[in-house]
Amino acid sequence: MAEIAEGGGGGHKGGKKRAKKQSTRIDMTPMVDLAFLLLTFFVLTSTFSKPKSMELTFPVDDKDQPEIKNEVKNGITFLLTKDDKIFYYEKEFKGKDQPEPTQLKELSFDQSSLHKYLADKNKWATDQIKTLETQFKSKQLVDSVYKRKVREVKADKESPTFLIKTDDKASYKNVIDLIDELNINLVGKYVVIDMLKSELELVNEKTGGTP
């Protein structure tokens, strides 16, 4: 608040009385209190940006560990290469010298291709998770139970396991786009591993590349 301090009157000079001097003093205490209140308000109500990250699962790099095989039950393998091409095959890989050798099929990053394929393959898990989400929103499940049940559905043996492999011509963007689609379709089991030589030969046959 402001105060007006009055100084003492001057003496008489020449029979005239001088006017009293006045000075103004402003009390800044209320202003400081208001500033701290506003600062506290904005800190408590502001939303800070969160760092964006993506979880990736890689195999253990240990020579003592057995070699990862393609005999993955209910497994699907994606092979990424140049020109945004996605080849895939289901179940384990079979070479040309085996009965019913593996034949590669092709997908694209179009909404009607890769997204639809993943939605169809993971429909069982997606339906289960949507049911849990409905129960959670209606407060039938608490947060901890809801998250635990979602993890269990994603890890269930009925859910397919996706193997992501790339050659030296594939782009990093394509890998991220593929993982994004896996996450959008609530896929819980996927791993990024090296492409086998026999798989690379099939990819080169499809693209006309060199072995």
Image: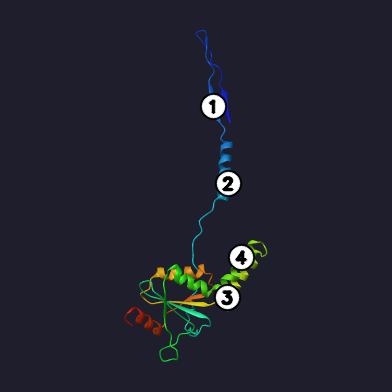
- Residue wearing tag 1: 24
Q: Nearer the viewer, mark 4 or mark 3?
A: 4
- Residue wearing tag 4: 133
Q: Amino acid at mark 1?
A: Thr
| Label 1 residue SS | strand
- Residue placed at 50% from the left, 75% from the top? 190
The answer to which image quadrant residue 150 occupies is bottom right
Pick whichever of labels 4 and 2 is earlier in the sequence. 2
Pick whichever of labels 1 and 4 is earlier in the sequence. 1
Alpha-carbon neighbours of circle 3 within 10 Å: few (<14), some, or many (≥20)?
some
Q: Nearer the viewer, mark 4 or mark 2?
A: 4
Q: Quadrant of the N terminus?
A: top right
CB within 8 Å, label 1 to label 3? no
Pick whichever of labels 4 and 3 is earlier in the sequence. 4
Q: Which numbered tag is attached to residue 155? A: 3
- What is the residue that sits farthest to the right in this orientation? 140
CB within 8 Å, label 4 to label 2? no
Q: Nearer the viewer, mark 1 or mark 4?
A: 4
Alpha-carbon neighbours of circle 2 within 10 Å: few (<14), some, or many (≥20)?
few
- Residue wearing tag 2: 41
Alpha-carbon neighbours of circle 4 within 10 Å: few (<14), some, or many (≥20)?
some
Q: CA distance from mark 1 to mark 2?
A: 32 Å
- What is the residue that sits farthest to the top in this orientation? 15
Q: Is residue 120 visible?
A: yes
- Residue placed at 53% from the left, 20% from the top? 21
Pick whichever of labels 1 and 2 is earlier in the sequence. 1
Position of 144 with respect to 200 (left or right) is right
Q: Position of residue 121 (x, y in %)?
A: 52, 75
